[in-house]
Image (tube, rainbow, N blue to C red):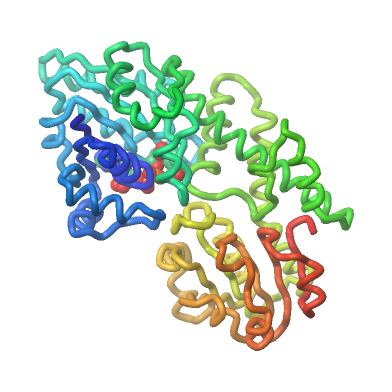
Amino acid sequence: MNLTVIGTGYVGLVTGTCFAEMGNNVTCVDIDQKKIYNLNKGTIPIYEPGLEKLIQENKKAGRLSFSISLKEAMEKSKLFLIAVGTPESPNGEANMEYIYAVASEIGEHLIQESVIVNKSTVPVGTSERVKLTIDEGLKKRGIKVKFHVVSNPEFLKEGDAIRDFMRPDRVILGTDSKYALDMLKQLYSPFTMNHDRLITMGVKEAELTKYAANAMLATKISFINEIAHICDELGIDVESVRKGIGADSRIGYSFIYPGTGYGGSCFPKDVKAIIHTAKKAGVEPLVLDAVEKRNQRQKQRMFDHIISKYGSDLNGLIFAVWGLAFKPETDDMREAPSVNLITSLIESGGKVQAFDPVANEEAVKKFPQEWVSKNKLTFFDDNYTALENGDALVLMTEWKMFRNPSLSKMKELMKNLCIFDGRNQYDPDYMRNNGFYYKGIGR
Ligand SMILES: NC(=O)c1ccc[n+]([C@@H]2O[C@H](COP(=O)([O-])OP(=O)(O)OC[C@H]3O[C@@H](n4cnc5c(N)ncnc54)[C@H](O)[C@@H]3O)[C@@H](O)[C@H]2O)c1
């Protein structure tokens, strides 16, 4: 098939590349000229394991190309997948300007019967408005062209995106069009050969399914974070409690790891957006409000532990921070809890020596330039160098390379042997027996 992916970010780039890998001809379009220029030169804009190699191979095979012109891409294709951003508006609602800008552009250039698939996470009713917007464009041009709008939300997770896309748990197709369904069943058949993973439903149900899935996962995280807080106050170890509840197959082990709060480009904005949807529908979102509130609180927990040890004036203290991205295997810094922590540390007078294996470059953009120029915040290329003269290490992202650090090196480099473990990666007894002060989340 010839298909066009509109929006070449984390979702669009992975989607386009994986469809090309299955033999389709894919054009990835973006309005960001620099991004497209770089991709054409071979520079990949994001860190995602395995992606660069797949892009190079498919470009070389002539199946994957990058363009800034949607109009040109539309001349060769009848299938369009929208994967532009739907960030948070100031009132918590999803900002839909990019989606409707794409819909207008499609209306301006549509020339043949086509299927328009929305992969972005969008509120209920968006597909209907996309349809109306395209219709308006066609009316202005005084022509009639048949088209079908489908909701096909994406469930990949950054850091494991290729595997998630290639072997999805399910593919949700929200449409009442047989034409669109036949085309998409064909498109997705290489990904569902092992067993049928397609779930078809109404457009609005598909739109809400994506928000409900993310809200459920966020709920699990906020729940265990609250249990961890209770454990802190009672002086007991949440890790035993986690194992004890995870063993129940109705609960399971996934997404019940206590930490520094969920971040990233999806959970925070999607929980706020579904809260907004609920309120607009006249429903008081009791559970969802609590999930969001707990997460805000959780992002401050590590800092609370730090000031309860050092007091609120951190002048003269140096904090090494290991891990900046909102989770391992990505350079995505959107809503990363490390930003809250580092900001609080520096605003309280502390100095920060930060290290992330891939996200330093993205992270520096999140802080005032002045902090870097005045050496309040320094980024390091190596995790041990970041420890030099440190009064404490704060672990914020559970990259594998941090799991078993050399304690002798740490002892040599650090001024004070002190660990704040935001991801419960270390055994408290082992650390304490080695002379470290240790504080984890709920332990
Ligand atoms: N990132 C994830 O892990 C993930 C997972 C599942 C779903 N989603 C959803 O997918 C959508 C995209 O997320 P993302 O993280 O890939 O976003 P992103 O910000 O990484 O990428 C969006 C891209 O769209 C481009 N764009 C904006 N307007 C455009 C236009 N008119 N024409 C062409 N390109 C345009 C931007 O320049 C940008 O490159 C969001 O709705 C998000 O909620 C994201």
Ligand 1 lies in quarter: top left
Q: Residue furthest front?
A: 194
The residue at the point 15 percent across, 24 percent down is 110
Decide if residue 175 is in sight here: yes
Decide if residue 86 is in sight here: no
Position of the C terminus by quadrant: bottom right
Residue 416 in percent (x, y) is at 72, 83
Left or right: where 198 falls relative to 301: left
Q: Quadrant of residue 364?
A: bottom left
Residue 305 in percent (x, y) is at 75, 64
Residue 437 in percent (x, y) is at 78, 74
- Nearest the eye: 110 or 172: 172
The residue at the point 49 percent across, 32 percent down is 169
- Nearest the eye: 378 or 176: 176
Left or right: where 327 falls relative to 409: left
Q: Quadrant of residue 282?
A: top right
Left or right: where 251 falls relative to 334: right
Counting every numbered tag in the picture gives 0
Left or right: where 120 falls relative to 413: left
Question: With respect to residue 7, does 185 lie above or below?
Answer: above
Question: With respect to residue 147, does 104 lie above or below?
Answer: below
Residue 63 in percent (x, y) is at 19, 42
Q: Quadrant of residue 278?
A: top right
Position of the N terminus by quadrant: top left
The residue at the point 22 percent across, 59 percent down is 42
